[in-house]
Amino acid sequence: MNILVCDQPFDLSAGAAMCPGQLGTVAYEGNPANAGLTWQEVEELQDGVLVLFAAVFGFLVLRKLL
């Protein structure tokens, strides 16, 4: 996959990306082997979602009781 690059910042004022300098391409090859999450990261995300759910549920219960 190639990525477009410009040697100056892109100008977005005309509603489209314009390159005021030299436009070029750079070859990019991502590393698909590291694209996924590890099991440890999955567990951490699940723990965070569970804590968030419990906090919101507790807040809603307290609000209904008061």
Image (spheres, rainbow, N blue to C red):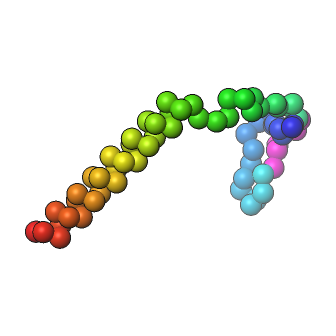
Is residue 22 visible in the rendered image? The answer is no
Q: Nearer the viewer, residue 23 or 4?
A: 4
Give the number of marks: 0
Image coordinates of residue 36 in percent, x first then y, are 64, 36
Image coordinates of residue 15 in percent, x first then y, are 74, 60
Q: Nearer the viewer, residue 42 or 4?
A: 42
Left or right: 41, with 33 as reference point:
left
Q: Quadrant of the C terminus?
A: bottom left
User: Main structural element of the magenta stretch: helix, strand or loop?
Assistant: loop
Q: Residue at x 50, y 33 (%)?
A: 41
Image coordinates of residue 12 in percent, x first then y, are 72, 53
Is residue 51 visible in the rendered image? The answer is yes
Q: Residue at x 59, y 35 (%)?
A: 37
Magenta segment range? 18-24
Does the magenta portion include 21? Answer: yes
Does the magenta portion include 48? Answer: no
Image coordinates of residue 65 in percent, x first then y, are 12, 69
On screen, residue 9 above or below 66 = above
Q: Residue at x 82, y 30 (%)?
A: 29
Left or right: 39, with 22 as reference point:
left
Q: Residue at x 84, y 40 (%)?
A: 4
Q: Quadrant of the N terminus?
A: top right
